[in-house]
Amino acid sequence: MMERYGVTGFSWVPTFAQGLNRDLRVRWALEEAGLPYDTRQIDLTDRKSDAYRQVQPFGMIPAFSADGLDLFESGAIVQLIAENSETLMPIEGPDRIMTVVWMYAALNTVEPPIDNLATLDLQHSDEEWAKLGRPTVVEAVRDRLAVLAGQLGGRDFLIGRFTAADILMATVLRLVQHTDLVASFPAVDAYLKRCEARPAFRNVLGQQMAEYAKNMPTVA
Amino acid sequence: MMERYGVTGFSWVPTFAQGLNRDLRVRWALEEAGLPYDTRQIDLTDRKSDAYRQVQPFGMIPAFSADGLDLFESGAIVQLIAENSETLMPIEGPDRIMTVVWMYAALNTVEPPIDNLATLDLQHSDEEWAKLGRPTVVEAVRDRLAVLAGQLGGRDFLIGRFTAADILMATVLRLVQHTDLVASFPAVDAYLKRCEARPAFRNVLGQQMAEYAKNMPTVA
């Protein structure tokens, strides 16, 4: 028995956050795997509600329903989808192992400094501590991007072929698209463009942008 | 064919970092699973060397060797160990899925603000931006701990029984042991103590502390 998957995201977010929400990772993975799914939408203001916390205890998106289970954590959801799709993850052997390694590298080593920078710039840019602390955060991001550039030399994707690890890494890199940091590492820049050029990504991004446009709040 | 596992950590670290290094996660998982392994040690100053970067591109610890492969990322290594040990992860079904969910929750939702706070306090405490920015970071940590406290109500471990997700979550929570944050959430505090009381954890922590003591640099 296999129910149709459900992916929960926000009905609308401000322009600066559009295309950066983590439900996009899950939708991209489902699209690459050719799995049908429904989208469900909550308002930004509903995310901390008791009802939504029953599904996603941290009050974040995405939430994911599959086979009667309510799941959360974009990394876990993408991995669980990938385990059922050879398009996203080799079934066994060293390539499967290195896919898992790079999934965690994307979310536990590369995303933290990148998310810190995005948070500083997009949510705290007027605050003194954010201005003073920014150079330290930028340096941490540059360190990670330099390593990534070295890894990608001569390879199209992280383990060679496209996998779920690239979905996570590309969506992480997009979080600093308001800066020139990725562009300053040509191998990383080319890699991100290669990921973003995939038809599955273009489809889900286009669909999400259309949803946001449709749901844009009217001025009261 | 199965080679003996090898876990690389630092030969010695300053007192404030002892017991917080991420190779401890891997050693704890191996100990719970009853798998034999060798430890390998690098000096703090060697971590950015070209030779070590061949094994661990980000110049961090742990590195892990298994079946001729060089792996990195503590989360990925713990997961791969767990996939071969029912002690650490149920083989299939909803409990396996929720173990994966909580592994990613530990490393991608709970660890980032906690690691930010540890970094502020342990590496940047004299800097003005760290002082000014600290309340925002503490608030983010409190948010996560409050959710965790709610999840743990009535449960001994994250999914009920002990799993690899608890290894990751407990080692994340230990990163702010220099504060009273965990203690201020009794359910989380009791959970962490429950994890730390496990014989496997006590063994590997004791072994690592003995190694650090033995390798303590002499004053020149």
Image (cartoon, coloured by chain):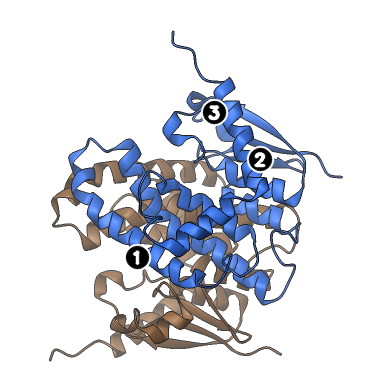
Chain colours: A brown, B blue
| Residue B152 position within the rendered picture, expressed as x and y whole percent measured from the top left | 51, 69
x then y, percent, for residue A214: 30, 90
Position of A192 relative to B96 (above/below): above
Could you classify mark 2 by the number of other residues whose Cα lies within 10 Å: few (under 14), some (14-19), or many (20 or more)?
A: few
User: Do tags 3 and 1 sit on the same chain?
Assistant: yes
The residue that label 1 is drawn on is B143
Determine whether the residue tagged by mark 3 lies in a helix, strand or loop.
helix
Which is more N-terminal, label 1 or label 3? 3
From the viewer's perspective, is B56 left or right of B2? Answer: left
- What's under tag 1, amino acid-wise? Asp
Identify the residue at image location x=68%, y=73%. A84
> Which callout, 2 or 3, points to the residue nearer the camera?
2
Read off the residue under disc 2.
Answer: B203
Q: Quadrant of the N terminus of chain B?
A: top right
Query: Which residue sits at x=73%, y=72%?
Result: B92
Q: Which residue is drawn at the image coordinates 66% and 40% (left, top)?
A: B203
Which residue is denoted by mark 3 in the rendering?
B50
Please determine if labels 2 and 3 lie on a single subunit.
yes
What's under tag 2, amino acid-wise? Asn
- Element at label 1: helix
Comparing B130 with B212, the one in front is B212
Q: Residue at x 22, y 50 (%)?
A: B133
Q: Marks 2 and 1: which is nearer the front?
A: 2
Dot 1: within a 10 Å radius of its alpha carbon, few (fewer than 14), some, or many (20 or more) residues?
some
| Chain hosting mark 2 | B
Q: Is residue B163 visible?
A: yes
In the displayed structure image, the side of residue A216 where residue A153 appears, left or right: right
Q: Which mark is residue B104?
A: none
Q: How far apart, in angstroms, are the residues tagged by discs 3 and 1?
A: 40 Å
For disc 1, the chain is B
